[in-house]
């Protein structure tokens, strides 16, 4: 089936304006938040109902046409990068909040609903949706499920997988499945956990039942400044070692705090080598006791300055700086490459020292901002794509950071997914038998490999070609893709 035939067939049940095929109409869909790699899709389809999604998938399955599902396009690993000979299936129009049940503390929503909109809808009931990625004002819940997103409060409240109960999913052949249930557990294999974080490779999510959490009576944050990043890392371990599970615990290095402070004016100490934000929430008495303990631990850990938010406005200002780290990077550099790896907390200082050494080696600045409580790093490598070869150097720098995470006993991703960005590093993270198992799971859901092909799980041939250690100087990971 050629492009013209497919457009004609899709327009038998979709409005003309919901099937895009002209080049100028396709351009907005050629990349996600990882804009270094771009690819124009053959067709973009914009369904408004679950049945339309199912029919699109049935047609593509019969014609063996690849399909890439896309949410808000805020992903940072190239997971929604289109296929040149496939359909880009946008779920942006499935954006209704179907039900909020305050008694059950749940909400049923379509995949195009923004993360933050769920919390806004739950406000009248004293509830909210706990996962809060920095892009929550724009990112959609379907994309959160695909990438198993987290946020600054995931240490205490968990990732997406810990905050959903049920999914409606359409398979590549158009079957509609319900996975999970309203209860805390369901019989059989945990397919809910399997689907969450599967990056659109197993099915297309059309409805999500999320858990809602009661809003705490009070939240307060301690901001501690350290003259040595190792002391800040030790403070993180000391807080957790004391049996405290903060609502959020985030760290930023000096280059990050300078960039953020110029942008947000959060009140950060610009002389500090590292800033640590540690929040407590819950009942008023509980928060008061925990904040006192956190202050004592920060002091004993060698903090040069400790400040505690006095009201909600100050608390939000402290957090605004952390959440603005990515846009702040865009103000100080023409381009930035956002990495995502996870390491054991005890290895924080060593890995950060290693990143600093790599920064000097490559002559590229790197802003470090991360979920310190669970060791999820987000190094932002600053570069200029207009300088020949600088993107390739940046890729190599990033690959070495991920390799360092593996060697430290961690993983190559915490919440951004693998997409195309880290597909080579999967060869180093996993052995042949493990990769074969991943492919077997994929084949059980999508035997023809039509859903989001070429993402997340590398072929064994690719790993062999890259010799399990992936990017060498001057080598382009995705030479076939147009560059930004």
Image: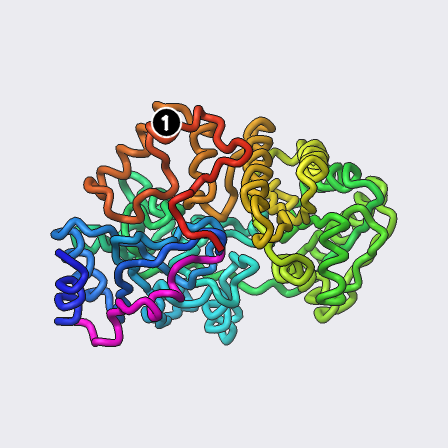
The answer to whether residue 164 is visible is no
Quadrant of the rendered image containing residue 456: top left
Badge 1 density bin: few <14, some 14–19, many ≥20, Cα 10 Å: few
Q: Residue, x 40% and y 66% (percent of image)?
A: 28
- Residue 295 in percent (x, y) is at 80, 50
Mark 1, secondary structure of its residue: helix
**8 or 287: which is nearer to us?**
8
| Quarter the N terminus occupies | bottom left
Looking at the rendering, the stretch of residues picked out in magenta corresponds to: 13-33
Residue, far front: 388
Residue drawn at x 26%, y 76% as measured from the top left? 17
Residue for badge 1: 434
Q: Can residue 192 be seen in the rendering of this structure? A: yes
Left or right: 291 as drawn, with respect to 101:
right
The magenta stretch spans residue 106: no
- The picture places residue 201, in percent across and down from the top left corner, at 31, 46
Q: Is residue 389 above or below residue 289?
A: above
Please check the rendered image and state whether residue 30 is part of the magenta-colored stretch, yes or no: yes
């Amino acid at each position: 089936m050629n492009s013209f035939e497919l457009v004609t067939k899709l327009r038998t049940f979709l409005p003309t304006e919901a099937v895009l095929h002209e080049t100028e109409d396709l351009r907005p869909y050629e990349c996600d938040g990882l804009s270094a790699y771009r690819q124009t899709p053959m067709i973009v389809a914009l369904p408004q109902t679950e049945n339309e999604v199912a029919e699109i998938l049935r047609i593509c399955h019969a014609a063996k046409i690849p399909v890439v599902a896309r949410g808000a396009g805020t992903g940072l690993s190239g997971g929604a990068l289109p296929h040149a000979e496939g359909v880009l299936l946008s779920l942006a129009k499935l954006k209704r909040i179907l039900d909020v049940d305050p008694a059950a503390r749940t909400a049923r929503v379509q995949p195009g609903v923004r993360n933050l909109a769920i919390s806004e809808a739950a406000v009248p009931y004293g509830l909210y949706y706990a996962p809060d990625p920095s892009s929550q004002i724009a990112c959609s819940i379907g994309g959160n499920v695909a990438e198993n997103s987290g946020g600054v409060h995931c240490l205490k409240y968990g990732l997406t997988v810990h905050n959903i109960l049920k999914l409606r999913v359409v398979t590549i052949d158009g079957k509609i499945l319900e996975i999970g249930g309203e209860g805390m557990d369901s019989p059989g294999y945990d397919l809910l956990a399997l689907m969450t974080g599967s990056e659109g490779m197993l099915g297309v999510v059309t409805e999500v039942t999320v858990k809602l959490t009661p809003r705490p009576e009070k939240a307060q944050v301690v901001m501690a400044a350290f003259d040595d990043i190792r002391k800040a890392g030790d403070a993180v371990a000391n807080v957790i070692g004391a049996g405290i599970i903060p609502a959020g615990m985030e760290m930023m290095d000096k280059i990050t705090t300078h960039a953020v402070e110029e942008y947000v004016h959060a009140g950060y100490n610009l002389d500090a080598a590292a800033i640590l934000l540690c929040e407590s929430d819950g009942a008023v008495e509980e928060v008061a006791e925990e904040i006192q303990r956190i202050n004592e631990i920060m002091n004993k850990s060698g903090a040069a300055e400790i400040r505690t938010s006095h009201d909600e406005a100050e608390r939000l200002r402290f957090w605004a700086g952390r959440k603005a780290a990515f846009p702040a990077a865009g103000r100080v550099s023409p381009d930035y490459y956002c990495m995502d790896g996870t390491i054991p907390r005890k290895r924080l200082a060593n890995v950060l020292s290693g990143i600093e050494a790599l920064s000097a080696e490559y002559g590229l600045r790197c802003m470090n901002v991360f979920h310190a409580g669970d060791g999820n790093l987000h190094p932002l490598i600053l570069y200029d794509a207009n300088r020949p070869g600088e993107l390739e150097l940046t890729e190599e720098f990033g690959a070495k950071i991920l390799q360092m995470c593996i060697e430290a006993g961690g993983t190559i991703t915490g919440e951004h997914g693998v997409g195309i960005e880290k597909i080579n590093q999967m060869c180093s993270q996993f052995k042949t038998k493990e990769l074969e198992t991943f492919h077997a799971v994929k084949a059980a859901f999508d035997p023809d490999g039509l859903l989001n092909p070429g993402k997340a799980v590398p072929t064994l041939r690719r790993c062999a070609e890259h010799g399990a250690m992936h990017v060498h100087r001057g080598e382009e990971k995705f030479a076939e893709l147009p560059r930004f």
